[in-house]
Image (cartoon, rainbow, N blue to C red):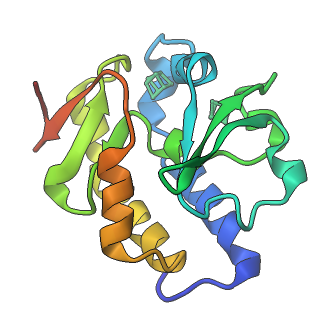
Amino acid sequence: MEGPLTTETRSKFFQMKSQELEITGCANSGCGWACCSFQKKSHIIIMPQEFADIPENDRKHLSIIDDDYLGGMKVHCNAKDTSNCDGGYKPVHCGIYPLWAKSLSETSLYRSNKCPLPDHVVDATAKDVLATMQAYGRDKLIPVEEFETFLSTVYIDNYSKFDEGRAVK
Ligand code: SF4
Ligand code: SF4
């Protein structure tokens, strides 16, 4: 999808992207959708302005624990049905898991060490993850430098550098 998005389509677009990014190998990984448990035990990072267009009713499974975390937020997930986020909004952080981009360049990817997926499966999603993050920054009109500072500064627990399909410690 090219160009700026209208307010009506924004939240739908990012929710769709989150769902699209769901990795097909997850269902067979045997992990039992463990990342929802990790996220529920610790927290989910909400990007700057991510909740701006999301109706409260769609995010009632997410309780805010820090409403100004480096310009974004930290939330807990209380969803009972993690297969569909209780029918509500799936944050970008959940959608791009197990990857995280510390900037918008291809060399900035990190992967969670907690996810059992092999690197080659995760690697297949890397381009889409970066494209989603780049589209997000453009659409939300977040200055690139500001967004990159956010991405590089937030604390991500137990991740390793992910370089050309290989996790590099
Ligand atoms: S991303 Fe990793 S931890 Fe999450 S459901 Fe898929 S295999 Fe499991
Ligand atoms: S918001 Fe959805 S994907 Fe994220 S931890 Fe909760 S149930 Fe899982």
Examine the rendered structure and indicate whether residue 23 appears above or below residue 59.
above
Find residue 146 and report its horizontal and vertical position in percent.
37, 68
Report if residue 80 is visible in the image. Answer: yes
Task: Check the image and name the residue furthest to the right.
Answer: 57
State the image quarter where residue 114 is shown.
top left
Find residue 92 and report its horizontal and vertical position in percent.
54, 50
State the image quarter where residue 51 is shown.
bottom right
Q: As drawn, is 4 to the left or to the right of 23? A: right
Q: As drawn, is 52 to the left or to the right of 147? A: right
Task: Check the image and name the residue furthest to the bottom.
Answer: 3
Query: Which quadrant is home to the C terminus?
Result: top left
| In-front residue for pair 125/74 | 74
Report if residue 101 is visible in the image. Answer: no
- Residue at image coords 20%, 62%: 105
| In-front residue for pair 118/34 | 34
- Residue at image coords 71%, 26%: 82
How many numbered discs sit on the rendered protein? 0
- Residue at image coords 21%, 34%: 120
- Residue at image coords 33%, 23%: 117
Examine the rendered structure and indicate whether residue 22 appears above or below residue 28.
below
Examine the rendered structure and indicate whether residue 142 appears above or below residue 110.
below
Q: As drawn, is 35 to the left or to the right of 122? A: right
Find residue 62 and report its horizontal and vertical position in percent.
75, 37
Find residue 50 and report its horizontal and vertical position in percent.
62, 60
